Each structure stands twice: as C-alpha cells, then as structure tokens.
Amino acid sequence: MLTHIYIILLTLAVLCHGQPVPTQTAVSDPFQEAVEQTKNADPMVRLRAAQTLGDLRRPEAGPALLALFEDPHPFVRSAAVNSVGRMRLAGTAPTIARLLSPRKEKESQVRQAAATMLAFLGDPTVVDALAEALGDPEAGVRYAAVRSLGALRAGKAVRPVAALLRDQDGNMRRTAAGALGQIMGKESVEALEAALPKEASTEVKEEIVRSLGMLGDPAAIPSLKAALADAVPTVRLQAAMGLGRLGDSSGQAMACGMLTDASADIRRLAANTLTMIGDKEQGLVSLDAAVKAEADPGVKASLEQSRMMLRARLGVPEPPPAPPEPEQKKDEAAASKPEAKKGAAAAPAKKPAAAKKPAAGPVKAVPSGKKPAAAPVKPAQKKPAAPPAKPGATPSGAKGASTAP
C-alpha cells in the first residue's frame, strides 16, 4: 500500500516539474485605468473615463481631462468639462472660458457646460466671457451664463443682465431677476424697481419682488410696500417677506388673513411668511388657530412646523401637555352627576348570593379549647332481608371465605 502511494507522489512530482507557479493577480488601480481609458478608440469608453476621473476627484487627473477638451466627440468634451468643474481644479477657469466662444466651440452643449461649470470654479476673471455669452444664439447657453453671473455676484455684469429683463422670453426675464437678487448693489435695485411696474407675468413679478427683498437695501422699501397691494397673493406675500428682512412687519396682518385662503399653497406660503415677520400677539395666535382649524393633513403638518419655527424665533416655549385626569376623579365626577344618581335610585344594587349550606347541617361555633360536638347521625334505615342463599353460594358479607369446595 505504501509503495503505491509513493509511486503516485513520485509521478505527480515528475509531471509538475518545470511548471510555472501560479501567482496572485495584481489589483488594478481605478485611477490609472481611467487615465488609460481616456485614450481608448471607443468614444463611449472615453466618456466613462472622464466621468470616473471626476468622481474620483484626484487633482492629478487634470492633464488627462484637459486633453479631452480637444476630443472629436462633443459629449466627451462636455463630460470632461463637467468633471473639471465638479472637481474645482484650480487654474482651469480661463481654459474653460475659452470654450464659451462659438468660434472656439461650435457645439452648444459644450458651451452650456462651460458656462455652468464656471460658477463652480468661482474665478472672477471669467465675468467678461460670461457677459459676452449672454448674447449666445442658443438659449441654453444664455440661461447658464446669467445664472453663473448671479452665483459669482458679478457687479460689473449688472447692466447686461438687467437688459434681459426686457427679453421676450418670460423665463429669461425671471432668471435675470433672480440673478440680480444675488448681485448686491444700487444698480440691481434700480433695475428691478424699473422693471416691476411694466411686468405683466405673475411669475416674473413675483421673482422681481423676491429679489428686491433679498437685496436687503432700504431703498427698496417703497416698492415693496406698494407690492403689498398687488392683485396676486404670492406677490403680496413675497413683499411681506422682503419687508420683514428689512425689519418692517407691516405685511403681518395680510399674511394672517391668508392662513384661511382657499389655496393650500397660499396657506403654506402665508405660514412661512409669518415665521419671519410674525409676533407673539398676532402672528403666533393666528398660526395656533390655523393649525387647529386646518383639515388637510399635509397642510396641517406644514402649518405646525411654521408655528414651531415662529415660537423658536420668539423664544416662546411650547405649552406643557395637559395632565391626564385620574380614573378615580373621573369616577367621582361621573357619580356626582344627577343622571348617575337617578340611575342609582332606580336600579337597586344586587344582594350578594347566599352561601350554600353544608350537606351535613349547620355547624355551630365552638368555644376555644373544646372539641366540637359530633353532628347528630340519623338512624340508619333497615334494609329488606336478603333472600335465602342457594346451597353452595358464598355469603355476600363474608370476608376471606374460601371458594374451595
């Protein structure tokens, strides 16, 4: 047996002699792999590589991503621009700004990505390029450029942005009004005040009033007070909030009245407004009443949250919950009612059930130290005489009688 095992082992050693020993496969580096894939012939592979490098957020990916700015496919170039912007790679803003020019970049989707990502980089040197992009033939590029100018708070771009308040596109006017609300300065206030009386769109008018309030400039108070009488409820509430930011709570009564509006959105906005401008005597009292009267569960939750926020702002603690009434007090209160007394008189209480007597007769109490007397025993009744036994039969009362003959 041992000989056979030895032969098998020897055979295996001979067969395995000279064979390479298997080694563990090295784990690939996702970053290096993505960098290599930026040079792949398949554009979809290059697209995924650009996105992966952006997700990894390693600064050394800059050269590989910037090289993709010259990729022949626009969606690869857009992905590279988005990754650079999301990573906020320092020093790349001028390179991205050059992509805003239609002469440099013919594809509008790449120009729009460039205009959007410049807001992430926060470099003020690109304001001129963004202002020039406000005249781009594609609306998507113009929208992205005006939003980025607002995010950069580019004061030198107020005039070109304000010019968009006269644009035929209502959404563009609204976007421009929002951007001016981010750019601080007298010129923004003046441009918004000039556009407000001429604006016919409800949405744009609401955004203009909101931006005037966000600027926090006392010069806007007259325009905001005039907007308190606007026919549009949302415009009035935005004016009340704007005045509240400036320390003026003259819109509080109007906001309290809107807590009972037929529109659920208006009731929510009114409650949100009161969290900013409400006081203890009027705003908080109105919110408390509105919460109790609200029938819509979703709106009720919003009003309750606004009420809690207003209490926190005013420093008013929540009232303690009422202690539950003890059960004993409830029973006493119920018993003291006339109805309960009448019912008790009409229905007498039931008598307790009589105890059953013992079968052997009543047991008299026995003084201590004496044995109880035995209960009287009734005389036993005489049984009828048994018939005469047959010969050979065993008497029924005999014990231990032998049955043997």
Image (tube, rainbow, N blue to C red):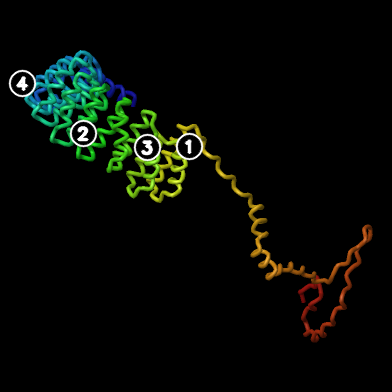
Q: Element type at marker 4? A: loop
Residues 122 and 280: in front is 280
Identify which residue is drawn at 24% across, 30% down: 193
**Where does residue 76 sit, x and y in percent of width and height?**
13, 25
Nearer mark to the viewer, of 1 and 2 = 1
Q: Amino acid at mark 3?
A: Gly
Question: Which numbered circle lies on residue 351?
Answer: none
Residue count near mark 4 (Cα–Cα under 10 Å), binned few <14, some 14–19, many ≥20: few
Instruction: Give the residue pinned by disc 3.
Output: 251
Question: Which numbered circle lies on residue 103?
Answer: 4
Nearer mark to the viewer, of 1 and 3 = 3
Residues 198 and 36: in front is 198
Q: Amino acid at mark 2?
A: Arg
**Where does residue 151 sit, x and y in percent of width and height?**
24, 24
Q: Earlier in the sequence, mark 3 or mark 4?
A: 4
Instruction: Give the residue pinned by disc 1.
Output: 280
Nearer mark to the viewer, of 3 and 4 = 3
Identify which residue is drawn at 30% across, 40% down: 229
